[in-house]
Each structure stands twice: as structure tokens, then as C-alpha cells.
Image (cartoon, grey):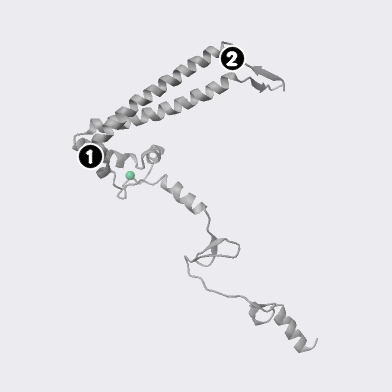
């Protein structure tokens, strides 16, 4: 091949010039610093790491969220080993057992521990009853159904409630009404005690 012909082909197919020339298009090269973020033409966001780049995704937010579920909100938290019990408290209250106890102690010091406890217990009761109502409502739907099971031998067995379904449902409805009434009662206790502790609460749980 004639050298000049080869030169043209090389340039055209990017064999020349260190590969930056391809069919006459010049790739814009940009050096990235660690931590740089950019979005490519496909809309994918990249983050430059030391020596390589990774795709940044929504998972980063999810990871952060999951992280927060196991991190005590108290910046000065001294609990090093967090047991499952600690993690349960963090998920529920934001604080590990020790930090929560330390914070709650301040309600005692301020003399309104009883109101704080009432407020807290009423909250738990409301949560419990709300959950119970949901189960009752599921039971109402289930009571009407014919349940089918396939046995180990492959036979289909039909199970139905062998009592009075209407009576069962009417009892469940009564239970729901009672639970709803109890929620109203607890809500009143919760609101009343909140009025008395809300200022303290804001001061104590600032973090
Ligand atoms: Zn803590």
C-alpha cells in the first residue's frame, strides 16, 4: 500500500494520533478529579473515584437511608456495640437505648416525667390498636372466602368457617368499633399531655 494511502486510512480509522481521531471526530478528553460528578449523553451520572469511575444511582440515597436506620441521632453517642435491641430503638425513636434514656431523664429533672410517659404510652396504644383494626378488617374479608389447600397427595381441600359467618363478621365489626373508640380516648390523652411537654420535648430532642 502506498504510504500516503495508509496514512489516510490510519487517520480515518483512528490508528494514528494515539486513537483520539475517529472518522474525523475528535474526542474531547477531560481529566476528572476524584469526587467529580458528570452525566453522560445517555443520562447516566458518574462519579470519579481514585483511578476508576462508578455509576451514581438512587442506591446512594437508599444506602444513606439504611445507614440512618442504624445510626443514633445523638452526635455524642457513646454506644459502640449496637445490639439488636439498640437498633430497634433507633428505628423507632431515632436514638439508641442509652441516649434515649439520657434524654428522657431530663423530663424527670424538669418534673414532667408522668406527662411524658402518658404521651408515650398513648402513642404506643394508638399504634397497637391501628394495627389491630387492620387485622380485623383483613379477617372480615377472609371470613367470606372459601379457602383452598392442595394436600401433599395433590388433592384439593376446601375449607370454610363452620360456624355462622354473619355472626362472626358482626362480632369482628363490634371489635373494630370498640378499638376505634379506644383510639379516640388515647388520642385525647396524647394531645393533652403533648400540650404540657411539647416545649421540653423540642429542647431535649434538638438533634
Ligand atoms: Zn446513642
Residue visible at 37% across and 23% down in the picture: 182
Residue designated by label 2: 161
Residue visible at 55% across and 13% down in the picture: 166
Q: In this view, does 48 lie above or below 18?
A: above
Query: Can residue 11 be seen at all in this image of the molecule?
Result: yes
Q: Position of residue 9 (x, y in %)?
A: 74, 81
Q: Is residue 121 above or below residue 2?
A: above
Q: Position of residue 121 (x, y in %)?
A: 32, 29
Residue designated by label 1: 106
Q: In this view, does 154 lie above or below 97?
A: above
Name the quadrant where ligand 1 sits: top left
Residue visible at 48% across and 27% down in the picture: 134
- On the rendered structure, is 70 left or right of 43? left
Judge depth for marks 2 and 1 and give the one in front.
2
Q: Label 1: how many residues lie within 10 Å, few (<14), some (14-19) or many (20+)?
A: some
Q: Earlier in the sequence, mark 2 or mark 1?
A: 1
Whether the residue under disc 2 has CB within 8 Å of ligand 1: no
Amino acid at each position: 500500500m502506498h504510504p500516503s494511502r495508509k496514512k489516510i486510512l490510519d487517520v480515518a480509522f483512528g490508528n494514528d494520533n494515539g486513537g483520539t481521531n475517529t472518522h474525523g471526530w475528535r474526542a474531547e478528553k477531560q481529566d476528572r478529579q476524584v469526587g467529580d460528578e458528570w452525566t453522560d449523553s445517555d443520562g447516566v451520572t458518574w462519579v470519579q473515584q481514585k483511578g476508576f469511575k462508578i455509576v451514581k444511582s438512587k442506591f446512594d440515597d437508599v444506602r444513606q437511608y439504611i445507614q440512618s436506620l442504624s445510626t443514633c441521632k445523638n452526635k455524642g453517642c457513646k454506644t459502640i456495640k449496637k445490639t439488636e435491641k439498640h437498633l430497634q430503638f433507633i428505628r423507632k425513636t431515632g436514638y439508641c437505648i442509652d441516649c434515649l434514656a439520657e434524654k428522657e431523664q431530663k423530663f424527670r429533672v424538669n418534673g414532667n416525667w408522668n406527662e411524658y410517659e402518658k404521651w408515650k404510652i398513648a402513642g404506643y396504644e394508638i399504634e397497637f390498636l391501628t394495627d389491630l383494626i387492620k387485622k380485623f378488617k383483613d379477617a372480615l374479608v377472609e371470613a367470606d372466602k372459601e379457602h383452598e389447600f392442595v394436600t401433599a397427595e395433590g388433592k384439593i381441600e376446601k375449607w370454610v368457617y363452620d360456624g355462622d359467618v354473619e355472626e362472626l363478621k358482626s362480632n369482628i365489626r363490634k371489635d373494630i368499633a370498640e378499638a376505634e373508640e379506644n383510639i379516640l380516648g388515647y388520642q385525647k390523652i396524647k394531645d393533652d399531655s403533648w400540650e404540657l411537654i411539647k416545649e421540653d420535648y423540642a429542647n431535649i430532642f434538638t438533634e
